[in-house]
Image: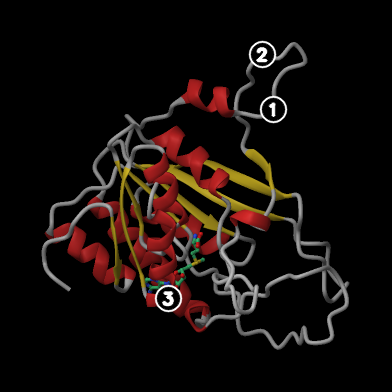
Amino acid sequence: MQNTLKLNKIYKQDSLDFLNKLHKNNIHPDLIFTDPPYNLSGSNLNLKNNKTGGAFYKVNETWDIMKEDEYFDFTYQWIKKSFDIQKDGASIYICCSYHNIGEVTMAIKQVGYSIKNIITWAKTNPMPSITKRTYTHSSEFIVYAVKNKKWIFNYETLKDINPDKAKNGTNRQMRDVWTLPQCQGKERIKDPQTNRAIHPTQKLEELVKRAVLASSNENDLVLDIFMGSGTTAVVAKKNKRNFIGCDLEEKYIKVANERLVGL
Ligand SMILES: C[S@@+](CC[C@H](N)C(=O)[O-])C[C@H]1O[C@@H](n2cnc3c(N)ncnc32)[C@H](O)[C@@H]1O
């Protein structure tokens, strides 16, 4: 890959190498929104004869399997490098679940960010409990943190886009519990041959949009170092922000680029 990075482009590269390259290129994202591997793949759960629910997709990817200490080290490294390239006042949002929220919050505090909220994404269409030996997992989290004191928070914009209105129709404050579906239906990118989702963890645009509108302004730069199918880039572009990012997998970058055409 060339040494000079361009904005509004997704690179095929490892996240840590990419963060180093951003540093060398003097690129300082105003906002990082990212959805890293949760380290939840690799269980022996056999879903072949699963009769519950509909077309659910179990995440089982090689990029998502690490030993516990290796996973903390990986999490710490990319969060530390993210902190180092962001200027004072910048924000970071990290998606996680009960699997990895401990590692994410520990690393985020250790490197020097200040946690402002842990947003709960309450899923309206969760995958049913396959084992029937746990409560149905119907939530994920987004850790929202800032670097130093003068962070952007577009409070009124959030009120305007909040679907939860008062009885008389007036705007309400955006709460830290977001009741939204998992990405399905028309928004979910599917392989036309198999009709299966192309990316196992494609996030809903609305989830990313709230963070982008709250914590950046037009023409700001939004970074995602685990870009996947490109949701962060799509939301940034639709909302007149610049974006940059990377992913290890060519096939996901191709999908992301296809989503960006014509926006
Ligand atoms: C949880 S998914 C992100 C999904 C994305 N938010 C979306 O809406 O499609 C994580 C992504 O990180 C990528 N990935 C995993 N390890 C990586 C690494 N070390 N460097 C760069 N990308 C990586 C995977 O290929 C995967 O697409």
Mark 3 highlights which residue? 251
Left or right of 138, for residue 220: left
Q: Residues within 10 Å of mark 1 (few under 14, many from 20)?
A: some
The quadrant of the picture showing ligand 1 is: bottom left
Is 58 placed above or below 26 here?
below
Q: In which quarter of the image is residue 185?
A: bottom right
Q: Quadrant of residue 247?
A: bottom left
Task: Give the spatial CA distance, label 2 vs label 1.
Answer: 9 Å
Give the residue type at disc 3. Lys
Is 24 placed above or below 12 here?
above
Q: How crowded is mark 2: few (under 14 residues within 10 Å), some or many (20 or more)?
A: few
- Circles 3 and 1 in contact, beta carbons < 8 Å: no
Residue at the image point whose x is 37% and y is 45% from the top: 237
**In the rendered view, how is the structure colored?**
secondary structure
Task: Give the spatial CA distance, label 3 vs label 2.
Answer: 44 Å
The earlier-in-sequence mark between 3 and 1 is: 1
Give the residue type at disc 2. Thr
Q: Is residue 96 visible?
A: yes
Q: Which of marks 3 and 2 is in front?
A: 3
* Relative image position of residue 68 (x, y in whole percent): 52, 78
Q: Secondary structure under badge 2?
A: loop
Left or right of 256, for residue 21: left
Give the residue type at disc 1. Asp
Left or right of 62, for residue 123: right
Residue at the image point whose x is 11% and y is 67% from the top: 3
Is 30 placed above or below 107 here?
above
Mark 2 highlights which residue? 170
Q: Residues within 10 Å of mark 3 (few under 14, many from 20)?
A: some
The earlier-in-sequence mark between 3 and 2 is: 2
The earlier-in-sequence mark between 2 and 1 is: 1
Left or right of 70, for residue 86: left
* Relative image position of residue 87 (x, y in whole percent): 24, 42
